[in-house]
Image (cartoon, rainbow, N blue to C red):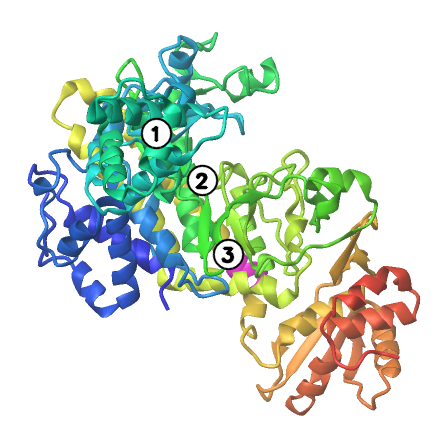
């Protein structure tokens, strides 16, 4: 089975770096002896077909066939230099075609590729030479969005067609789509390419329309056809209404008319816009942010930048978020690197890239570019990212009711909700978010994370790897202590899941440490900074830029050290004991969680009682249960400081279970100790199931029957329920 990561690694690292030679004018597609790309294709039919389809959609089947044989030269196809952005259009399209083959379930940790995703665009010449400063230029009327009515495209900026200023979030920037290039025009006008077929189909549809009033595109295309027909027939009395009847049942004439319209420059933008709309890679939105306005001077220093007034939450917000240009660049690197780090964890993450531009004073300006997240799945088509905004109640993700309108409207009209646990393995992501110490990982409204179908999807890790990395605030039940001011918001979104599901993240984090995939991300960025410094050396005019990159390198070293220390704290201090038995079957770590919920107060709703949950939550003071192997090495010794009441609760539970089983228990001061030898493990873990704990707490009156009704319908796992 092919997954997106294997396609992207092969396509991006080999196709962009070695197959298309960016440094020469020939741009030969070649079988380089140092590349295993064609070897990979020959060994994987699914990858071969997906990549060929991507090439075909951009350049036509003839080009694709030659390219896959390694015999095609782009120079013979178009004099237009094929940019990295163009390559990315091919790759993005191929990814969509390939993703239908992606296995269901979650991704394993990904060993970082030679080049991190966030650095793939850093050498793009279009961006390095482009003048951004979009906010200022838009306000001065120098930049325009597309004008479909008059058939005019948006302004091109650094390889992107401007659509609008960025509206969501406080950071400045704009929304764009990949620019239309000469290569696209060549594909559009080459017979029988997918783009050509789309164009001919669109022209034919417009020519056949007879309803009034007509869209500008229809009017323009019919007018072009009319001029052709007047010249062809010599009848200058023809009107636009005559076009459709004249072409009916005359395929040869209709074909010549469509060819004429296709070549008519006055119709070009109408045709391009429709073809773009039906070509996923060209229709996908891209968000370019951190493009601070040059004219928006900070009062205390001209070297500082600030967020625009239109998105700020007042003047104080602007004042306290102002930063130097160097700090803005470091933040850009940190955010993109955090996205790469999440991707290495196996999280579906927005493909954020650094763009290297420059300020008017010549200093480096790092922007972030990221395409709108979407996924193609078999039977579902294109699925777009949607955030959790409006779907959070009491910190939990809730189901919405279509008949009540939007999620936020539904919430306003209801006082009881069902927790939504349809996202695959949502709980395993909690430890990753805690490891990154991003207090705003979810967002106060839930708009920093979301879903694509039933897959958890991450955007905007803007506060990752910051000051909270030094906190030692995590507990072995995945709860945590908040600081006085800096608080982790809405992390309870991950809590309506089993302990084993949440623990999956811990074992994945351990795998990352073992294979080095997490630190490889930091190392890739360190190597990039070194290459930038090397390219600037030897010219005294570059001294300030060199200093900026050296400062960035030092900051990167601190982030790597902070990450390593927090990762090791999580694996060794918080979960080290439980990792020793994490792979044991039956799962004793799940039994530890049940013991904690049995010996503490628990609930099956959110704190306010509004949200009915699938899994029990500890609501009282928690007594942490510890586990070691017994002297025989085959059983378990379990203990917790529960006091005598803990033993009484366990005895009552086992008594009510209507079994003859009760593990050996004894008290040592406040410490309750259990011994579960190998012969009793299966019985013990069979009783220590969440469904059994719930039924017991209902029976003793700790949880109301009404609160448990929905939980019962949700089929909480358990053995025979307690009667």
Q: Which percent across, then down, holds residue 709?
A: 85, 64
Q: Is residue 535 magenta?
A: no
Query: Is the Cβ of the residue at disc 3 closer than 8 Å to that at disc 2?
Result: no
Residue hosting label 1: 243
Q: Which percent across, then down, holds residue 173?
A: 43, 24
Residue in the foreground of this view, choosing between 318 and 79: 79
Task: Of the two numbered discs 1 and 2 on the same chain, state the one appearing first in sequence.
Answer: 1
> Would residue 369 be seen by someone viewing this image from the given angle?
no
Q: Quadrant of the N terminus?
A: bottom left
Where 123 falls versus 545 (above or below)? below
Task: Please state the extent of the stretch shown in magenta in the rendering.
Answer: 569-575
Label tally? 3
Local crowd at mark 3 within 10 Å, few (<14), some, or many (≥20)? few
Q: Give me the C-alpha separation between circle 3 and circle 1.
A: 39 Å
Q: Which percent across, then down, holds residue 196?
A: 26, 42
Task: Of the two numbered discs 3 and 1 on the same chain, state the one appearing first in sequence.
Answer: 1
Left or right of 387? Residue 180 is left
Residue in the foreground of this view, choosing between 95 and 650: 95
Disc 2 secondary structure class? loop
Residue hosting label 3: 380
Q: Quadrant of residue 41?
A: bottom left
Left or right of 451? Residue 55 is left
Residue hosting label 2: 372
Main SS of residues in magenta: helix
């Amino acid at each position: 089975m092919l997954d997106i990561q294997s396609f992207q690694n092969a396509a991006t690292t080999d196709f962009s770096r070695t197959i298309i030679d960016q440094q020469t004018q020939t741009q030969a597609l070649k079988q380089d002896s140092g590349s295993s790309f064609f070897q990979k294709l020959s060994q994987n039919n699914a990858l071969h077909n997906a990549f060929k389809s991507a090439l075909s959609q951009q350049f036509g089947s003839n080009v694709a066939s030659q390219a896959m044989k390694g015999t095609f030269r782009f120079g013979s196809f178009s004099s237009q230099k094929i940019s990295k952005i163009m390559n990315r259009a091919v790759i993005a399209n191929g990814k969509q075609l390939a993703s239908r083959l992606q296995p269901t379930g979650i991704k394993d940790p990904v060993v970082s590729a030679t080049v991190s995703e966030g650095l793939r665009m850093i050498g793009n010449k279009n961006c390095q030479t482009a003048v951004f400063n979009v906010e200022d230029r838009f306000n001065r009327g120098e930049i325009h969005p597309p004008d479909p009515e008059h058939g005019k495209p948006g302004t091109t900026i650094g390889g992107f067609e401007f659509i609008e200023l960025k509206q969501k979030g406080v950071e400045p920037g704009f929304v764009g789509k990949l620019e239309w290039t000469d290569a696209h025009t060549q594909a559009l006008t080459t017979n029988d390419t997918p783009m050509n077929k789309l164009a001919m189909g669109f022209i034919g549809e417009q020519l056949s329309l007879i309803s009034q009033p007509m869209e500008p595109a229809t009017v323009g295309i019919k007018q072009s056809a009319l001029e052709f027909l007047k010249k062809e027939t010599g009848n200058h009395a023809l009107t636009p209404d005559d076009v459709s009847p004249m072409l009916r049942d005359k395929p040869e004439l209709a074909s010549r008319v469509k060819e004429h319209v296709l070549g008519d420059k006055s119709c070009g933008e109408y045709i391009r816009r429709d073809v773009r709309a039906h070509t996923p890679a060209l229709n996908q939105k891209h968000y370019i942010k951190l493009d601070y306005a040059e004219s928006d001077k900070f009062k205390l220093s001209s070297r500082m930048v600030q967020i625009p007034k239109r998105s700020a939450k007042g003047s104080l917000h602007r004042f306290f978020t102002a930063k130097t240009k160097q700090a803005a660049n470091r933040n850009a690197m940190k955010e993109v690197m955090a996205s790469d780090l999440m991707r290495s964890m196996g999280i579906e993450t927005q493909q954020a890239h650094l763009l290297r531009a420059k300020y008017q004073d010549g200093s480096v300006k790092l922007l972030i570019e990221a395409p709108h997240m979407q996924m193609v799945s078999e039977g579902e088509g294109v699925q777009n990212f949607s955030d959790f905004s409006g779907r959070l109640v009491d910190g939990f993700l809730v189901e919405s009711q279509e008949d009540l309108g939007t999620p936020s409207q539904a919430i306003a009209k209801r006082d009881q909700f069902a927790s939504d646990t349809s996202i695959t393995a949502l709980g395993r992501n909690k430890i990753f978010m805690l490891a990154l110490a991003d207090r705003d990982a979810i967002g106060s409204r839930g708009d920093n994370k979301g879903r694509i179908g039933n897959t958890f999807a991450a955007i905007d890790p803007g506060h990752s790897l910051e000051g909270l990395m030094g906190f030692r605030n995590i507990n072995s039940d995945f709860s945590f202590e908040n600081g006085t001011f800096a608080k982790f918001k809405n992390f309870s979104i991950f809590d309506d899941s089993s302990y084993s599901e949440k623990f999956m993240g811990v074992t994945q984090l351990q795998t990352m440490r073992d294979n080095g995939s997490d630190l490889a991300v930091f190392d890739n960025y360190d190597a990039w900074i070194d290459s930038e410094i090397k390219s600037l050396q030897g010219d005294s005019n570059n001294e300030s830029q060199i200093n900026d990159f050296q400062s960035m390198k030092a900051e990167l070293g601190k982030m790597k050290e902070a990450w390593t220390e927090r990762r090791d704290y999580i694996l060794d201090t918080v979960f080290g004991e439980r990792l020793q038995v994490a792979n044991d079957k039956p799962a004793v770590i799940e039994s530890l969680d049940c013991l904690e919920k049995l010996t503490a107060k628990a609930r099956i709703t959110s704190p306010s009682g509004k949200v009915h949950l699938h899994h029990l939550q500890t609501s009282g003071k928690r007594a942490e249960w510890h586990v070691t192997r017994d002297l025989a090495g085959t059983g378990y010794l379990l203990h917790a400081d529960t006091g005598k009441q803990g033993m009484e609760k366990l005895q009552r539970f086992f008594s009510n279970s209507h079994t003859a089983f009760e593990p050996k228990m004894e008290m040592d001061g406040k410490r309750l100790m259990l011994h579960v030898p190998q012969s009793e493990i299966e019985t013990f873990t069979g009783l220590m199931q969440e469904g059994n704990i719930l039924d017991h707490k209902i029976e003793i009156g700790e949880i109301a029957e009404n609160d448990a009704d929905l939980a019962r319908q949700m089929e909480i796992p358990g053995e025979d329920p307690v009667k």
